[in-house]
Image: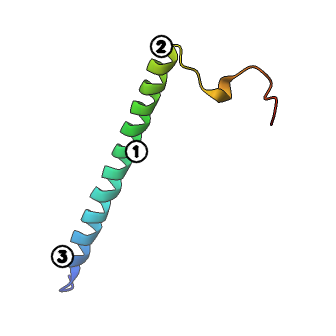
């Protein structure tokens, strides 16, 4: 192999680990936000977008 192959492979490995970490972070954060929304809705707190008033004033 070429003399710089180790550098290139290490760079790809670091990039792959970084992307995988970001994917896990985004998925985990999405689950946490959904869990928070479920807890808030169970407590009776509703989103304004779920209001059934027909959106008067918009």
Question: Regarding mark 3 in the picture, which secondary structure is present there?
Answer: helix
Would you say 32 lies left or right of 38 here?
A: left
Residue 34 percent across, percent down from the top left? 46, 28
Separation of marks 2 and 1 at Cα, in angstroms: 26 Å
The residue under label 3 is: 6
Q: Earlier in the sequence, mark 2 or mark 1?
A: 1
Would you say 23 lies left or right of 52 here?
A: left
Q: Quadrant of the N terminus?
A: bottom left
The type of colouring in the image is rainbow
Q: Which tag is nearer the camera, tag 2 or tag 1?
A: 2
- Mark 1, residues whose alpha carbon is within 10 Å: few (<14), some, or many (≥20)? few
The residue under label 1 is: 26
The residue under label 2 is: 43
Q: Earlier in the sequence, mark 2 or mark 3?
A: 3
So how many labels did they put on this image?
Answer: 3
Q: Is residue 5 above or below residue 38?
A: below
Question: Regarding mark 2 in the picture, which secondary structure is present there?
Answer: loop
Residue 43 percent across, percent down from the top left? 47, 13
Q: Quadrant of the C terminus?
A: top right
Q: Is residue 26 above or below residue 54?
A: below
Q: Is residue 29 above or below residue 51?
A: below
Question: Regarding mark 1 in the picture, which secondary structure is present there?
Answer: helix
**Tag 1 near tag 3, CB within 8 Å:** no
């Amino acid at each position: 192999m070429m003399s710089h192959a180790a550098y290139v492979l290490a760079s790809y490995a670091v990039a792959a680990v970084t992307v995988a970490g970001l994917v896990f972070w985004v998925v985990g954060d999405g689950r946490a936000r959904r869990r928070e929304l479920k807890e808030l809705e169970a407590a009776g707190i509703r989103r304004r977008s779920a209001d059934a008033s027909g959106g008067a004033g918009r």
